[in-house]
Image (cartoon, rainbow, N blue to C red):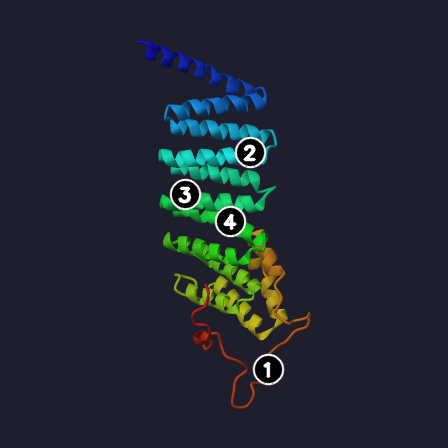
Amino acid sequence: SSDYIVKYYDHNIMSVVVISAVAFKNAKQFEQAKDAYLKEAEYHTENKALFHAAKAYEQAGMMLKDMKKMPEAIQLIEKASIMYVENGTSGTAGMALDRAGKLIEPIDLEKAVDLYQKAASVFENEDRLRQAAELLGKASRLLVRLRRLDEAAVSLQKEKNMYKEIENYPTCFKKTIAQVLVHLHRGDFVAADKCVRESYSLPGFSGSEDCVSMETLLAAFDEQDEDVVSRVCNSPLLKYMDNDYAKLAISLKVPGGGGGKKKKPPVAPQGGSAGPTPAEEDDDYEGGLC
């Protein structure tokens, strides 16, 4: 029939386009390769073959990347990710968004955050919490680098909740340290303290190196003991964290310190004590922002 002839003709034409796209790509003729992939994507879209259309859009995006046209490349990869989701292949969408984030990160941190958060959301909707948490971790670090600390605090809490749900407790401990550093830089001691106290419910946290270090840091910060704050923040535990958090640790200063140091008197005043212990302070910090 005539319909069969038209479909056969279109199929042959598309086969030529696909072969041409690969040939142009291998010859590093990226403009022509991009155009060929876009034609392939349009053909598959018209024929409701969304997965193949998405792959073609993603390939066109990669050609734009090779042409150093990064914003346009990211736009096509995002379009591909939407089609992957519509096709029911959300995992592929999440991976595409992650790749796009890595591509744009060196030149646009704000866009990279957006892409990592979108990728995390895709994986979270699929109940793939490990991948979602890892992508949120990328977003959290970039938010710290951008000094968007309020958003970083929210992102870290979400990360920590995911790791808790999949019972990756050691990573929860590290997220607690990151939370404390972010909250102290935000000027919110109450929230920092609450993050540590809430972590006591995590198996293995109480008495761990991470726990003792944070208890020591918070006590010293509260007492304005700059020597102890500096010692904790320059310890290997904090110095060898992800670079963005290590920088927070190294740059942490006690409020009103002015380069000096304040310590509680070694002898308690008569009828009192040198100061409340963290346990005694619990009620004062109930209802923190963590």
Q: Position of residue 276 (x, y in %)?
A: 50, 79
State the CA–CA distance, disc 3 to disc 4.
14 Å
Farthest residue to the bottom: give it.
270
Residue occupying the point 51% across, 65% down: 214
Q: Quadrant of the N terminus?
A: top left
Query: Which secondary structure lies at badge 4?
Result: helix
State the CA–CA distance, disc 3 to disc 1.
55 Å
State the CA–CA distance, disc 3 to disc 2.
22 Å
Query: Is the Cβ of the residue at disc 3 closer than 8 Å to that at disc 1?
Result: no
Query: Is the Cβ of the residue at disc 4 closer than 8 Å to that at disc 1?
Result: no
Q: Earlier in the sequence, mark 3 or mark 1?
A: 3
Q: Earlier in the sequence, mark 3 or mark 4?
A: 3
Which numbered circle lies on residue 225? Answer: none
Going by the numbered disc 4, the residue's amino acid type is Ala
Which numbered circle lies on residue 72? Answer: 2
Asked whether residue 212 is in view, the answer is no
Query: Which secondary structure lies at badge 1?
Result: loop
Task: Using residue 125 as the reference point, say whether residue 113 is left or right of it.
Answer: right
Residue occupying the point 52% across, 35% down: 75
Q: Earlier in the sequence, mark 1 or mark 2?
A: 2
Query: Which secondary structure lies at badge 2?
Result: helix
Going by the numbered disc 3, the residue's amino acid type is Val
Based on the displayed image, in which of its 4 quarters is residue 15 positioned? top left
Residue holding disc 3: 122
Q: Nearer the viewer, mark 4 or mark 2?
A: 2
The answer to which of 219 and 89 lies nearer the viewer is 89
Residue holding disc 1: 266
Residue occupying the point 44% across, 24% down: 42
State the CA–CA distance, disc 4 to disc 2.
22 Å
